[in-house]
Amino acid sequence: MRVRRSTLAPARDRDVVVQDEDGKLVYSWPRKDSVNFGDSTNSACGVAVVLSKHKFRRSDVLCTYAPSSSFTGRAGTIGLKRKGVFDFIVFSVYMPVERGAKTSALLLKL
């Protein structure tokens, strides 16, 4: 799968919370209590990507992305790039799966 930079939001999308803690950069996408989510999310939702500051710099984070507001807290994405060293995307997805349930429909909505 190839993802072009233009499909991702600028580095500070409105849903991501960035924290600098104990030698780590924490990018999190919490569930928002003020929105009615229906059956797509619940109070347990919230995802994060944690980067070691020994390996990554804040400037390596090229962009972040969160899915539509109906899936707030279900997924988050970070595009990381350092010229001549690396260029990749990290996904964090919270998707509890029930035995025998088809997950493809939920994945397509993200």
Image (cartoon, rainbow, N blue to C red):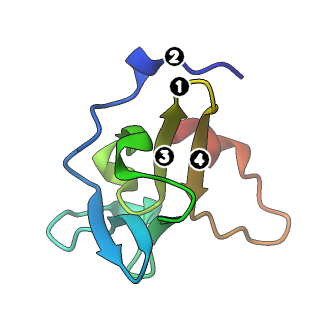
- The residue located at (31%, 61%) in the rendering is 37
Of residues 93 and 60, which is closer to you in this image? 60
Q: Are marks 1 and 4 in contact (CB under 8 Å)?
A: no
- The residue mark sitting in front, 1 or 3, is 1
Of residues 78 and 92, which is closer to you in this image? 78
Give the x, y percent position of residue 90.
59, 47
Circle 2 sits in a helix, a strand or a loop, which is it?
Answer: loop
Circle 3 sits in a helix, a strand or a loop, which is it?
Answer: strand
Asked where in the image residue 43 lies, by quadrant, the reply is bottom left
Residue ID for mark 3 = 77
- The residue located at (85%, 64%) in the rendering is 100
Residue ID for mark 1 = 83
- Could you classify mark 2 by the number of other residues whose Cα lies within 10 Å: few (under 14), some (14-19), or many (20 or more)? few
- The residue located at (66%, 19%) in the rendering is 2
Specify whether 37 is left or right of 80. Answer: left
* Numbered mark located on residue 90 in the image: 4
Question: Of marks 3 and 4, which one's residue comes earlier in the chain?
Answer: 3
Work out how far the residue at label 3 is from the one at label 4, CA to CA, in angstroms.
6 Å
Q: Amino acid at mark 2?
A: Arg
Question: Of marks 1 and 3, which one's residue comes earlier in the chain?
Answer: 3
- The residue mark sitting in front, 2 or 1, is 1
- Could you classify mark 1 by the number of other residues whose Cα lies within 10 Å: few (under 14), some (14-19), or many (20 or more)? few
